[in-house]
Image (cartoon, rainbow, N blue to C red):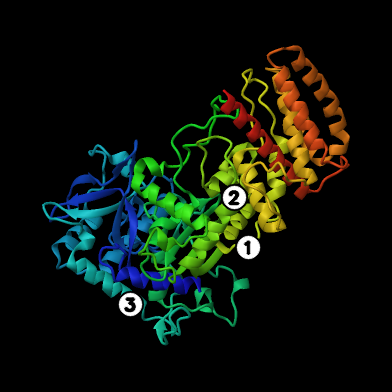
Amino acid sequence: MILQALHGYYQRMSADPDAGMPPYGTSMENISFALVLDAKGTLRGIEDLREQEGKKLRPRKMLVPIAEKKGNGIKPNFLWENTSYILGVDAKGKQERTDKCHAAFIAHIKAYCDTADQGLAAVLQFLEHGEKDLSAFPVSEEVIGSNIVFRIEGEPGFVHERPAARQAWANCLNRREQGLCGQCLITGERQKPIAQLHPSIKGGRDGVRGAQAVASIVSFNNTAFESYGKEQSINAPVSQEAAFSYVTALNYLLNPSNRQKVTIADATVVFWAERSSPAEDIFAGMFDPPSTTAKPESSNGTPPEDSEEGSQPDTARDDPHAAARMHDLLVAIRSGKRATDIMPDMDESVRFHVLGLSPNAARLSVRFWEVDTVGHMLDKVGRHYRELEIIPQFNNEQEFPSLSTLLRQTAVLNKTENISPVLAGGLFRAMLTGGPYPQSLLPAVLGRIRAEHARPEDKSRYRLEVVTYYRAALIKAYLIRNRKLEVPVSLDPARTDRPYLLGRLFAVLEKAQEDAVPGANATIKDRYLASASANPGQVFHMLLKNASNHTAKLRKDPERKGSAIHYEIMMQEIIDNISDFPVTMSSDEQGLFMIGYYHQRKALFTKKNKEN
């Protein structure tokens, strides 16, 4: 199913001359330099093809004859290669192997190239008799180890683009197709040349993040994977053309410049439609919506020192109109409206494919694979954001939190590399399918809340808020979807759930302490939040006793006497609805406790800001 869908995407994009999809037998590769030869094969110069990207020079993406799948063998590419094959020089110190690579490259050129062509003849003359010492050229040291092509001095284009070179490569492909024939499992066609090895899928910066530079999604590299005496990919016969098409389509989607690719933790996600659809252009924004550019404030008005806002590319700054349109679309689907209300040209019946890949040594693991109509997927995404919706802690926090932002709330030190791959894949799948969130989501969020404490070196009024807007949103969404609970967006004073009331009460007790003892090194949140949510019966009696001391201190100050009375009234109203303080509470109850705490704390500071 996956390979068939990729094959279909290749066929669709190949029909569009502006799409830039490589034709059969070619691939986009990183090329850094071109050796400039004269008609006699003498090296006249080295052309630097690299392109400036920020402060670094990056190889140019160039359409060349498709790269060979080498493994540990010696297999030269056609009319392009690294310096081991073309010059017989590398920096690895394995000259014997390098000499074999160079000889194989020359033999490959002789076997297929017509030397009647002036350009091909010049290349062969250079390879066999030309001077390969590059020390006279300024970039000689940078050339070693990089991929290079050939150019003839005074002539446009590169040697591999000449008609004679293209015909030679076509002859090479035709000879390869004379192998074993059979029925292709992708297209169903009979008597088609079967690919013994499928082309490589790119990894690293140009492909699947964290994977090797070349990887496979289909491979049989061990006898344990083979059956009936068949070797390698003959066990799952795919024609050479179909193997090329699905790999080329996937590499096309994995290209860093492609807008149909997002990275979530260790998973690289690509998506495409069955036919041309605006959804292909906007779907990435569903997972990483445009964010505000302003720096968020803490709940007491002071700016955090290490805010995560701005860590993602600022779509709103790059294209405000596109960001506004995406925001309007997200607001519409969150409220249950149709996407066509915002984008009339959107065909919601188009089938949409989402593929998540993660590295696994030389192979790629399929993390998830979802197929549905555009309309149904947008409905599921809208439901996800509807369940996440909660009153923000700061005025300029993300209204639609990206998956990466949410997942960092479950990771140690809020770092992407510490995100659980299983949790990331499960959250992504739940967002797309409308299924339950991972069972590990709530324990992960509660675990981070318990583990984090106030910064001891921070002497200002700022406190690290461990029950953040994003964590509260995750807890709310989990309780709604997985536990079928009704959780409000903002404070609900009429709600009588005991865990919710206990969370509210804890927030009021903390605020009374903060006002009575401003600048304290630690509040009750820093010492008792975890135990109060898990074992309230062991903590709250002591907290209430201390609270009476805090309100008594406030009463002694004429200017703060009103605050003391206000806190006492709030405490009494909440306690009147609490029958007892339970010895323990379940994870779900602890989650509801955190929601109550978050709501009440937000309400307390909101009221204070209005009064100011």
- Asked if residue 70 lies left or right of residue 438, the reply is left
The amino acid marked with disc number 2 is: Leu
Label ID, residue 175: 3
In space, the residues marked 3 and 2 are separated at their CA atoms by: 58 Å
Identify the residue under disc 1: 435
* SS category of the residue bearing label 3: helix
In space, the residues marked 3 and 1 are separated at their CA atoms by: 50 Å
Mark closest to the chain's N terminus, 3 or 1: 3
Residue 138: percent from left, percent from top = 25, 37
The amino acid marked with disc number 3 is: Arg
Residue 275: percent from left, percent from top = 38, 70
Q: Residues within 10 Å of mark 2 (few under 14, many from 20)?
A: many
Q: Residue at x 47, y 66 (%)?
A: 375
**How many badges with numbers are in the image?**
3
* SS category of the residue bearing label 1: loop
The amino acid marked with disc number 1 is: Gly
| Discs 3/1, front | 1
Q: Residues within 10 Å of mark 3 (few under 14, many from 20)?
A: few
Residue 168: percent from left, percent from top = 24, 70
Label ID, residue 93: none
> Is 217 above or below relative to 574?
below
- Asked if residue 581 lies left or right of residue 402, the reply is right
